[in-house]
Amino acid sequence: MSDTPATLALPVNVEQIQQLLPHRYPFLLVDRVIELVPDKSVVALKNVTINEHFFLGHFPGHPVMPGVLIVEAMAQAAGLLTQISSRLKGDQGSPLFYLAKVDNARFNAPVVPGDQLRLEVSLKRLMRGMGLFVARSLVDGKEVASCELMCAARSDK
């Protein structure tokens, strides 16, 4: 991120997000970071539009965002929490993390074009190169999905 710790300002926009995460279209699923408590929690947004590639086949005539992509969006928000927190400490960023485990995933309502996902992610704990996060997604203040995520630091470099 080109911003220095002293000048980092919210919201974090998509251009800044692309400097922090390796994901690109069509798999970059976070549009903006609007809240951050370093090393603790993040709130990010995903604007869901009819132009999303997955709506072509999920489901024709009744578009619904796949649950696995909602989980992926929450995992990307967790990645942004670690990356931004690291940068605020003056580090160049955390090592690349992979999604290693998803527990207690629940899907309470469909996400459809026109919705805005509010991704709320909190760090539960860090242990030996792994992070455990609690995540939930909301649309219009109602929880549509939740889970626990475990992410592991890349070990092949």
Image: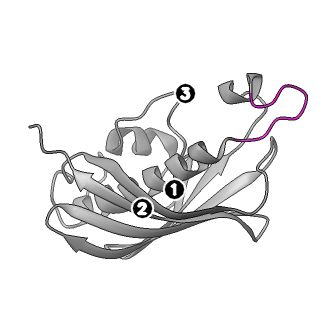
Task: Name above or below for residue 115 compared with residue 120.
Answer: above
Asked if the residue at tag 2 contacts the one at tag 3, i.e. Cβ–Cβ closer than 8 Å, the answer is no
Q: CA distance from mark 3 to mark 2?
A: 22 Å
Asked if the residue at tag 2 contacts the one at tag 1, i.e. Cβ–Cβ closer than 8 Å, the answer is yes
Q: Quadrant of residue 131?
A: bottom left
Decide whether the magenta segment is chiefly helix, strand or loop.
loop
Q: Nearer the viewer, residue 62 or 11?
A: 62
Q: Residue 122: where, in percent of width, then height? A: 44, 73
Q: Residue 107: where, in percent of width, then height? A: 69, 59
Amino acid type assigned to the residue bearing label 3 in the image: Pro
Q: Which mark is residue 149?
A: 2
Please indicate whether residue 19 sits to the left or right of residue 12 in the image: left
Q: CA distance from mark 1 to mark 3?
A: 16 Å
Amino acid type assigned to the residue bearing label 2 in the image: Leu
| Tag in front: 1 or 2 | 2
What SS does tag 3 mark?
Answer: loop
Say whether residue 60 is magenta: yes
> Which residue position holds label 3?
26
First in residue order: circle 3 vs circle 2: 3
Crowd around label 3: few <14 · some 14–19 · many ≥20 (10 Å): few
Q: Which mark is residue 74?
A: 1
Give, as a single range, the part of the protein colored magenta. 58-65
Please indicate whether residue 123 sits to the left or right of residue 14 in the image: left
Which colour scheme appears in the figure?
one colour
